[in-house]
Image (tube, grey):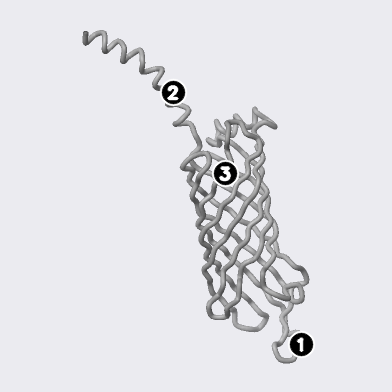
Amino acid sequence: MKKTILLLILLLLPSAAAAADPLLDQPRWSLEVTGGTFTPSLGNWSRYYGRRDMPEYATSLAYKFSPRVELGVGAGSVRGQGQAYAALHGTLVGNVTYELYPVHVFALVRGVVSEGQWLVPYVGGGWTRMFYQKKVQDQETVRGAADGYHVRGGLQFALDHLDQSASNRMYLDYGVHHTWFLIEAEYTRAVARSTSTDLGGTSYRGGLLFEF
């Protein structure tokens, strides 16, 4: 009897291992690298900086609890250069550089319904800490931070099917399961208490997503 049970266990082990492989082989992390534009909520922005938006670059890393749900952190960099004017008489006083460094903690939900899906929508949001710095020529630099929130949504397009051999090499060399191109929009609100100024705005970005 014991020999029979042992034989059954040995026969079942290969099939159990095969069944477990797909679960073990699922990607657990996602890395995003994006770039685009950031339009501040601040009024009269174009008057001082000559345009309505600034270039923005961002990256994030998230842990995937499932193909649909993940939790992560992200950081970005926004920078604009313009002209500073005196508050009383409105004359030009020099160049000004305005910088923002948003840090996000977020949850994200992806609309994954099947394996091999080539188009995936997603939405997310969470807490934001917005660090800012304003440098006016020949004046003291102003620094600070504000807390707030952000919401975002977008679409990701599968790149694996375009070149399957390259996709296989990415997995074998770097452990990357899937590569996506993404486009997204994000709204951020972060009000500085000292001035009641909203440092947030609206971002439009594109970039790459790697799942590993």
What label sits on residue 182 in the rendered view? none
Residue 199 occupies which quadrant of the picture?
A: bottom right
Residue 80, how many percent across, how many down?
A: 69, 68
Please say if 208 is above or below 132. Answer: above
Q: Tag 2's secondary structure?
A: helix
Q: What's the residue type where badge 1 is placed?
A: Thr
Please say if 90 is above or below 167. Answer: below
Please give the residue where the numbered disc 3 appears in the rendered image. Answer: 110
Q: Is residue 55 left or right of residue 101?
A: right
Q: Residues within 10 Å of mark 3 (few under 14, many from 20)?
A: some
**Front tag of 2 and 1:** 2
Question: Could you tell me how far apart the alpha carbons at marks 2 and 3 are, in whole angstroms?
Answer: 25 Å
Residue 130 occupies which quadrant of the picture?
A: bottom right
Question: Could you tell me how far apart the alpha carbons at marks 1 and 3 are, in whole angstroms?
Answer: 51 Å
Please give the residue where the numbered disc 2 appears in the rendered image. Answer: 19
Residue 60, how many percent across, how many down?
A: 55, 52
Name the residue rendered at 45%, 26% in the picture: 21
**Contact, CB < 8 Å: mark 2 with mark 1?**
no
Residue 48, how many percent across, how many down?
A: 74, 76
Q: Earlier in the sequence, mark 1 or mark 3?
A: 1
Q: What's the residue type where badge 3 is placed?
A: Arg
What label sits on residue 91 in the rendered view? 1
**Contact, CB < 8 Å: mark 2 with mark 3?**
no
Q: Earlier in the sequence, mark 2 or mark 3?
A: 2
